């Protein structure tokens, strides 16, 4: 039986490594393509690894010729909002030019199915709006703008080359593989749940930036999705394209979100440890509530999020935190 190779750019990263595990369990062979600037080779466990830079199109073309993939799943990107404001050129070059090379190589080599991991940062700061796929996009930083640009490239390539794509937009990804084969290991870490777990483990304090927002408990509310549920959607998106369906865009989220204090309370319940809190001032640009609400992925793809509740996301992240890490 012919192997069904899928190129997974950024497959050595947090989300990409979970995608590789899920793809391997679903009958595909994930080919991790990563430059290891933020990824970890130790996380590549479920298929071949090719260390290349997406800024080098010749290297990408060689990968397509070597594996003849049936599809691309594109996660590779720089993703720190603050850094993108300080170094906009780096983000436009890496995220947009790298993506353009990958998309161009796809069509040049006859691979017409493309799954793109985008972001709800393309919507900008639309405070207290329940975002869906038709919400206006007003990115307020180079990271969000670079992701929106890639969405535009995909639309143009569909018109000219009949490239079919599925785009996923989401906010905060949390949790880890319940079997702890792969997990979240950013250096430095910026995501709330692992930051809280790290503070709890080291008995350090956690700074909360603003407790006077117009929310029930005064802290910011954000939408979270479990990384395994997120990847389930990506695999369903791949199957959607395999079944010759039309290009489509999906928001992935809970539709309600959780406050910082809610997250802290649940960390304390899961870990049976107290979180030491320091109250800080609001950070510029932080919205009171950012939530992505849409049933489109559920209705069209048959997506069924199973672990996107706080208790499961924190428990899986805590299990990984206690025993999971990468050396290289």
Image: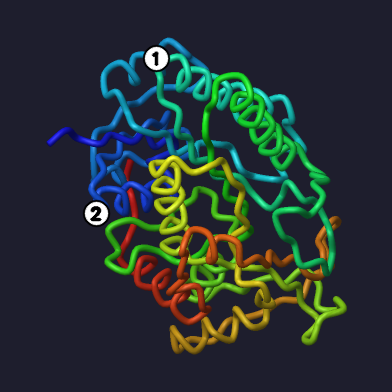
Above or below, comparing residue 292 to residue 113 in the picture: below
Distance between mark 2 and mark 1 Cα atoms: 27 Å
Neighbour tally class for label 1: few under 14, some 14-19, many 20 plus, Cα within 10 Å: some
* Number of on-image labels: 2
- Left or right: residue 95 versus residue 113 is right
**Residue that label 2 marks:** 25
Residue in the picture at 33% in, 40% down? 328
Quarter assignment of residue 315: bottom left
Instruction: Tell me which numbered mark, 2 or 1, is placed earlier along the sequence.
Output: 2
Which residue is located at x 75 percent, y 53 percent? 134
Q: In the rendered view, tell whether residue 147 sits above or below residue 275.
A: above
Q: Position of residue 7 (x, y in %)?
A: 36, 33
Image point 46% across, 61% down: which residue? 227
Element assignment for label 1: helix
Left of 136 or right of it: where is 59? left
Percent position of residue 79, x then y: 61, 43
Q: Residues within 10 Å of mark 2 (few under 14, many from 20)?
A: few
Q: Is residue 231 left or right of residue 162?
A: left
- Label 2 SS: helix
Disc 1 target residue: 61
Q: What mark, if any, has residue 285 been given in the picture?
A: none
Which residue is depicted at the point 55% across and 69% down? Answer: 193
Question: Which residue is at the far left?
Answer: 1
Q: Nearer the viewer, residue 179 or 304?
A: 304
């Amino acid at each position: 039986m012919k192997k069904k190779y899928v190129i997974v750019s950024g497959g050595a990263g947090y989300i990409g490594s979970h995608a590789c595990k899920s793809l391997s369990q679903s009958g595909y062979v994930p080919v991790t393509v990563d430059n290891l600037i933020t990824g970890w080779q130790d996380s590549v466990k479920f298929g071949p690894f090719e260390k290349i830079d997406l800024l080098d199109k010749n290297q990408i073309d060689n990968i397509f010729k070597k594996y003849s993939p049936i599809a691309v799943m594109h996660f590779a990107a720089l993703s720190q909002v603050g850094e993108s404001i300080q170094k906009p050129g780096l983000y436009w070059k890496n995220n947009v030019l790298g993506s353009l090379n990958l998309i161009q190589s796809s069509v040049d080599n006859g691979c017409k199915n493309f799954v793109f991991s985008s972001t709800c940062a393309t919507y900008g700061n639309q405070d207290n709006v329940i975002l869906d796929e038709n919400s206006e996009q007003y990115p307020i930083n180079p990271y969000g703008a670079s992701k929106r640009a890639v969405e535009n490239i995909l639309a143009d390539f569909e018109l000219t080359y009949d490239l079919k794509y599925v785009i996923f937009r989401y906010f905060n990804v949390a949790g880890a593989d319940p079997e702890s084969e792969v997990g979240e290991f950013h250096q430095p870490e910026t995501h709330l749940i692992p930051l809280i777990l790290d503070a709890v483990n080291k008995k350090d304090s956690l700074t909360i930036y603003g407790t006077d927002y117009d929310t029930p408990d005064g802290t910011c509310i954000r939408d979270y999705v479990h990384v395994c549920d997120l990847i389930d959607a990506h695999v369903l998106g791949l199957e959607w394209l395999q079944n010759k369906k039309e290009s489509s865009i999906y928001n992935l989220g809970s539709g309600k979100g959780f406050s910082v204090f809610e997250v802290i309370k649940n960390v304390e319940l899961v870990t049976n440890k107290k979180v030491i809190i320091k109250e800080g001032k609001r950070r510029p640009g932080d919205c009171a509530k950012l939530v992505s609400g849409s049933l489109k992925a559920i209705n069209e793809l048959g997506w069924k999020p199973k672990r996107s509740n706080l208790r499961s996301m924190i428990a899986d992240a805590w299990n990984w935190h206690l025993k999971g890490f990468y050396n290289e």
